[in-house]
Amino acid sequence: MIQVLLVDDQPLVRAGLRRILEPQDGIAIVGECEDGDQVAAAVDRCRPDVVVMDVRMRRMDGAEATRRLRAREGAPPVLILTTFDDDDTVAAALGAGAAGFVLKDAPGEDIVRATTTVAEGGSWLDPQVVGRVLDAYRRVAGRHGRAGAMTDLLTQREHDVLRHVGRGATNAEVAAALHVSEATVKSHLGRILTKLGLRDRSAAIVFAHDQGLV
């Protein structure tokens, strides 16, 4: 059972997300917050597997809430809810370690898939925001000139792992596709992050898109 914490300052949005997610088999809404400064306490109380969080809130935005949450050991991954005009906050959320980005008005099935994928250790980029997230990534990471050459540091197997990760696959899915163990995938991913100077899995998925591996 995937346990979800909803964070949005609009009750109607939270209610809409609940209507989309709660009827799904294997998903349970275990808590709600109306602002980013409530997230840490709610995570301690509810122990969610994933936090679905708005990027714009009154007292603390989703980027800062994500940064504080991801600094804690064992913190759950964060799926950011965004709109078409959130470029600066998307960049901040990416730098803070968000594992995925989905549009607030995305189809219900996409929100379900995004939530499930992120909860299971994967990453998610809404197709309509890929270009904006790539721009944000380049601003955050400053990789315009170096990225292409950096991929030469990877072995063929590491390229394969990065390609699957870039598609949002979990470690288990990558392991099944490449006929290796999950431990092997985790080891490869660790080396990929180190070689490319990437912070986390979400940065790896954006890097893969940026390099045309996906």
Image (spheres, rainbow, N blue to C red):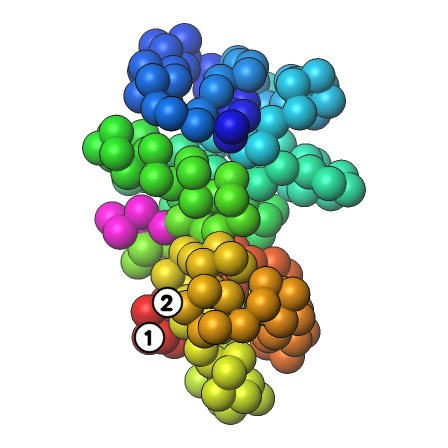
Secondary structure mostly seen in the magenta stretch: helix
Q: Is residue 132 above or below residue 90?
A: below
Q: Quadrant of the C terminus?
A: bottom left
Q: Residues within 10 Å of mark 2 (few under 14, many from 20)?
A: many
The residue to which callout 2 is attached is: 209
Residue sitting nearer the eye, 85 or 204: 204
Query: Tag 2, which secondary structure?
Result: helix
- Quarter residue 19 falls in: top left
In the image, farthest residue toward the left: 107
The spot of residue 203 in percent (x, y) is: 53, 60
Residue for point 73% across, 40% down: 74
Can residue 81 be seen here? The reply is yes
Residue for point 64% across, 79% down: 195
| Three-letter residue code for mark 1 | Gly
The tag on residue 212 is: 1
Instruction: Specify the segment rendered in magenta.
Output: 125-129
